[in-house]
Amino acid sequence: MNLHFSSTYALQEAKLCSASDAESLVYMLYYSCGGAFPDLDSVEGALQWRETSWSRRLIQQLLGDISTVLKAFADYVDSLCGTPYPMDYDIWLRRLRRNIHQEDHGKEIDTTG
């Protein structure tokens, strides 16, 4: 059992449930996107880290910041696998542009080169 990526239920009960894979994926995405993991040496420490991170909204904030990129990736994977519905890439491109614009809003741009 991996202390960083196992679901809370798996850590508490030493069993998997249907939501275990989804929760594990959230932790993997969090780490892959630059989220910091502390050194964990016990199940209790791992459970405490999860409780603190979720209550402070650290995981939600980081994954929310990259949600546009995750949506674009999911659509790309769907296009490779062949989906039963048409893909509208303009939707996520507009969202990506809007998020980039929001991040740049208010930042001073150095034009002196």
Image (cartoon, rainbow, N blue to C red):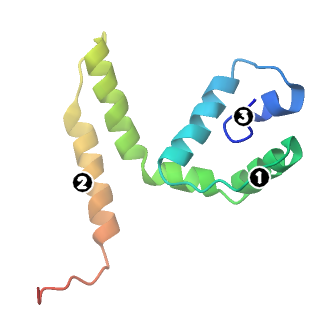
* Label disc, if present, on residue 61 of the rendered structure: none
Q: Is residue 92 above or below residue 77?
A: below
Quadrant for residue 86, please give it.
top left
Amino acid on which the number 3 mark rests in the picture: Asn
Residue 92 visible? yes
Which circle, 1 or 2, is nearer the viewer? 1
Q: Which residue is mark 2?
A: 97
Label 2, residues with CA under 10 Å away: few <14, some 14-19, many ≥20: few
Determine the CA span between mark 1 and mark 3: 14 Å
* Label disc, if present, on residue 2 of the rendered structure: 3
**Image coordinates for residue 90, horizontal then vertical, percent:** 19, 38
Which circle, 3 or 2, is nearer the viewer? 3
Quadrant for residue 108, please give it.
bottom left
Q: Are marks 1 and 3 in contact (CB under 8 Å)?
A: no
Q: Which residue is mark 1?
A: 49
Left or right of 64? Residue 71 is: left
Amino acid on which the number 1 mark rests in the picture: Trp
Callout 3: SS:
loop
Quadrant for residue 11, please give it.
top right
Residue 85 visible? no
